[in-house]
Amino acid sequence: MSGRTDSDAGPAIADEAEEYAEEAPEEYAEDARRARWTATGTGALLTLAGLAAALLRSTGAAPALVPAAYAAGAAVCALAAALGSRGRTRRALWLLIAGTMVMAVGDQFD
């Protein structure tokens, strides 16, 4: 047990931690709020677009898979909006991407 003990490193690290703790909550709270609103708004917008596309495609001569894909993509985007409003923005982002991809696959069958 001949480890090195530097007593000078402890206070310097503690001072940096105190400065970080004082600045972090205000700065990150605004970023988190903006991310929640962005995820919620984008999810709601993509949900409405997917539902509108599903309704328009269901009245036409498109195969049944097309409106189902749009509706499924809209459901995934609605789930992303719900997660985004609860602060799960990273999961919401991935679900928005997945929902948009499902809608794009439905568009390819049209």
Image: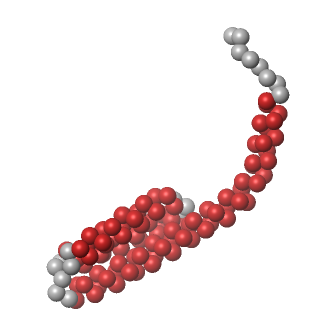
Residue 2 shown left or right of residue 110 in the figure: right
Colour option used: secondary structure
Instruction: Give the quarter of the figure containing the C terminus.
Output: bottom left
Residue 75 visible? The answer is: no
Q: Is residue 94 visible?
A: yes
Residue 42 placement (x, y as % from top left): 48, 73
Q: Is residue 95 left or right of residue 70?
A: right
Q: In which quarter of the image is the N terminus?
A: top right
**Of the pair 76 and 108, the residue shown nearer to us:** 108
What residue is shown at x 71% (from left), y 60% (from top)? 27
The residue lying at 31 percent from left, 72 percent from top is 103
Q: How many labels sit on residues?
A: 0
Q: Which residue is situated farthest in the top direction here? A: 1
Which x, y percent locates residue 93?
46, 63
Name the residue located 29 percent from the left edge and 75 percent from the top edge.
Answer: 70
On screen, residue 108 above or below 25: below
Residue lying furthest front: 108
Q: In which quarter of the image is residue 7?
A: top right
Q: Nearer the viewer, residue 53 or 84?
A: 53
Q: Position of residue 28 (x, y in %)?
A: 67, 58
Q: Where is residue 37 in the image (x, y as percent from the top left)?
A: 56, 71
Quadrant of residue 6 within the rendered picture: top right
On the picture, is 7 further left or further right than 49? right
Q: Nearer the viewer, residue 49 or 75?
A: 49
Q: Which residue is drawn at 76% across and 54% down?
A: 23
- Is 56 placed above or below 108 here? below
